[in-house]
């Protein structure tokens, strides 16, 4: 089925393009192999409930034109789900999201008796991407390719990292949204887990929560950039949130991020001055996340240069490594003992180690990677060191010959 | 003033119904029960105009209907203008008309055929793209009652119409028409 939708064609433009929607089984509800929609849905513990929105199209030749706003959103989201599923295959995550993605449109979500608007989030318990009503005059979130990719990443993070952690009661948070306001929490589950957690362990739990929330948001922003090549993809829909989340890394920001010590201090501050520590952490998580997104984006640029490959290829390479990282962080989270917390530099550590054996690694890239290790004790743990220009000294475990 | 009133009374008092009658119906109130842009079914108002010629028991008519809606916001919105061109063939199966009466009532069973077309204009961040879609055939059945009082007529019609360009494909319409009628 060929359909016209708004597509991001560059970092500075959206245009109407015709695309092919595959595996469509029911055009009236735009349902098929890649997406299934619910309109203003309810939810049980495990699924969205309610009816599907009805889409209206007019046909000219082989092309279908959405006749209204909702139909355009449905067609656009279906296409992005299809493309992101295809991208999953390239980055070895094909088996993470199986079957059509469940999508809720015009979802009425209440937080403290206030109805949420202009937000989107991934809800792990129902495995659904949920879009609240969009009331601004900007491009709707549901048409914003970068934000859709961002939310899609949350589903990967949930399934590869958080799901197991919840099962093992290692963390106490769940959903993640495009911005902090109106994010849904599963209050009952959180309360239950908190009461089960010893007071002395709560600091570690809060730190883990902040860190995991942070990298979830940061890596999701990276996914948004990978999908759109727009360092500022939020500007189309949420210009007021843009400033701190632009993914351009300035020279002075290289190596700067929220270290474990900073996160811990911030949590202490929240505990001292905020009655809603958890909500404060939600807002803070983006501050933790953005340096990670900028780091990965810059790494793509460096790797494209080092390996003499197109940026598109480097994006796939780094994104594949992000998926590997998710597997590794899941193991680490699962192995956490009570009262034990994350180091806060796991992403940087992972990519430094990943490149320790990379013979093509340029000196600039190496310096870039190690600059993120200097802020913590990880510098001593890293297998990667940089010698002189264009030469990388590996400090891997000595081989039998060397011994 | 009295002169004009007298003329109107004179005209209205004459019974000159001929076998053939021409109806012009520029004032129409048409509602279709169909999918709205708010994800529910609603009575959607259409703008329509028509003309009909009755030759003895057969009545042939033409209706033009259009409806326009716009959804979205300033950055992205979709305008949909739908136009229908319908030919109506009606059989006058019952007439109430007394001798020398200035009024008559006719009841028709109608068959409808025509076409429907949409013009979709999509506005995205100040750029606009417009497409006129394929013409889709329309088929329908209807019943109508026509009341004529000298030069004035009114008609109430219900229809079931089917077209791929409708949402859903079969819609029910109710129409009130007001116009002028002429014996020819």
Image (cartoon, rainbow, N blue to C red):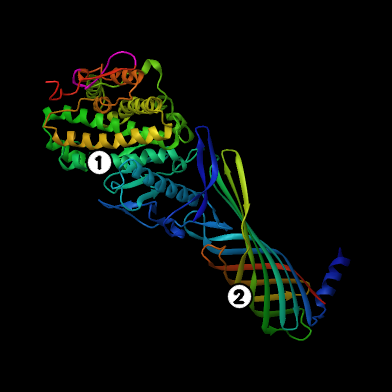
Q: Name the residue under label 2.
A: B142
Q: Where does residue A71 sit, x and y in percent of width and height?
A: 49, 52
Residue B67 drawn at (x, y percent):
62, 57
In depth, the one of A147 and A292 nearer the eye is A292
Whole-percent x, y for residue A253 in the image:
36, 18
Q: In this view, does A264 lie above or below A89?
A: above
Q: In the rendered structure, does residue A384 fall within the stretch colored magenta?
A: yes
Does residue B9 appear to the left or right of A381 in the view shown? Answer: right
Q: In this view, does A22 lie above or below A250?
A: below
Residue segment shown in magenta: A380-389
What chain does mark 2 sit on?
A: B
Quadrant that contains the C terminus of chain A: top left
Please give left or right for residue A331 compared with residue A302 in the image: left
Q: Residue at x 61, y 43 (%)?
A: B128
Q: Which residue is drawn at 67% across and 81% down?
A: B91
| Image quadrant assignment for residue A25 | bottom left
Q: Work out whether residue A113 can be spotted.
A: no
Residue lying farthest right? B3
SS assignment at label 1:
helix
Mark 1, residue position: A160
Asked if residue A42 lies left or right of residue A345, the reply is right
Q: Do labels 2 and 1 share a chain?
A: no
């Amino acid at each position: 089925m060929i359909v016209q939708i708004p597509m991001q064609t560059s970092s500075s433009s959206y245009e109407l393009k015709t695309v092919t929607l595959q595996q469509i089984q029911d055009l009236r509800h735009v349902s098929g192999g890649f997406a299934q929609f619910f309109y203003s849905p309810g939810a049980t513990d495990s699924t969205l409930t309610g009816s599907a929105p009805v889409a209206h199209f007019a046909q000219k030749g082989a092309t279908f034109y959405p006749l209204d706003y909702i139909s355009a959103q449905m067609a656009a989201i279906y296409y992005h789900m299809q493309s992101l599923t295809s991208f999953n295959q390239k980055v070895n995550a094909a088996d993470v999201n199986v079957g059509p993605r469940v999508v809720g449109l015009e979802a009425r979500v209440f937080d403290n008796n206030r109805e949420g608007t202009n937000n989107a989030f991934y809800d792990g318990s129902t495995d659904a991407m949920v879009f609240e009503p969009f009331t601004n005059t900007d491009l709707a979130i549901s048409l914003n390719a970068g934000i859709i990719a961002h939310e899609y990443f949350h589903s990967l993070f949930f399934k590869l990292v958080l799901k197991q952690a919840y099962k093992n009661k290692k963390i106490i948070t769940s959903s993640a949204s495009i911005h902090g306001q109106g994010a849904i929490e599963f209050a009952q589950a959180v309360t239950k887990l908190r009461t089960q957690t010893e007071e002395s362990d709560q600091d570690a739990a809060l730190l883990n929560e902040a860190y995991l929330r942070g990298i979830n948001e940061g890596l999701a922003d990276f996914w948004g950039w990978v999908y759109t090549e727009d360092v500022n993809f939020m500007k189309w829909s949420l210009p007021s949130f843009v400033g701190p989340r632009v993914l351009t890394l300035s020279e002075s920001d290289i190596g700067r991020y929220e270290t474990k010590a900073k996160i811990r201090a911030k949590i202490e501050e929240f505990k001292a001055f905020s009655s809603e520590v958890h909500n404060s952490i939600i807002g803070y998580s983006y501050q933790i996340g953005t340096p990670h997104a900028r780091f990965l984006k810059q790494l793509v640029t460096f790797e494209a240069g080092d390996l003499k490959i197109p940026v598109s290829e480097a994006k796939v390479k780094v994104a594949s490594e992000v998926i590997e990282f998710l597997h590794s962080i899941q193991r680490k989270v699962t192995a956490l003992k009570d009262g034990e917390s994350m180091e806060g530099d796991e992403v940087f550590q992972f990519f430094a180690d990943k490149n320790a054996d990379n013979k093509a690694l340029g000196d600039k890239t190496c310096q870039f990677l190690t600059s993120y290790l200097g802020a913590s004790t990880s510098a001593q743990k890293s297998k990667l060191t940089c010698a002189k220009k264009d030469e990388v000294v590996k400090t891997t475990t000595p081989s039998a010959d060397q011994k | 003033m009295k002169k004009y009133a007298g003329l109107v009374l004179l005209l209205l008092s004459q019974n000159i119904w001929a076998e053939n009658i021409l109806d012009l119906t520029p004032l129409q109130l048409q509602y279709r029960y169909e999918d709205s842009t708010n994800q529910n079914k609603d009575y959607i108002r259409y703008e329509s105009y028509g003309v009909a010629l009755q030759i003895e028991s057969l009545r042939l008519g033409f209706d033009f209907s259009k409806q326009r809606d716009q959804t979205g916001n300033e950055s992205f919105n979709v305008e949909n203008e739908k136009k229908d061109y319908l030919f109506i063939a009606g059989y006058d199966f019952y007439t109430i008309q007394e001798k020398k009466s200035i009024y008559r009532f006719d009841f028709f069973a109608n068959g409808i055929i025509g076409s429907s077309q949409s013009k979709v204009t999509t506005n995205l961040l100040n750029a606009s793209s417009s497409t006129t879609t394929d013409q889709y055939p329309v088929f329908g059945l209807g019943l109508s009652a026509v009341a004529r009082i000298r030069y004035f007529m009114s008609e109430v019609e219900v229809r079931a119409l089917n077209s791929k360009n409708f949402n859903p494909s079969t819609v029910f319409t109710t129409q009130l028409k007001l116009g002028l009628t002429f014996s020819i």
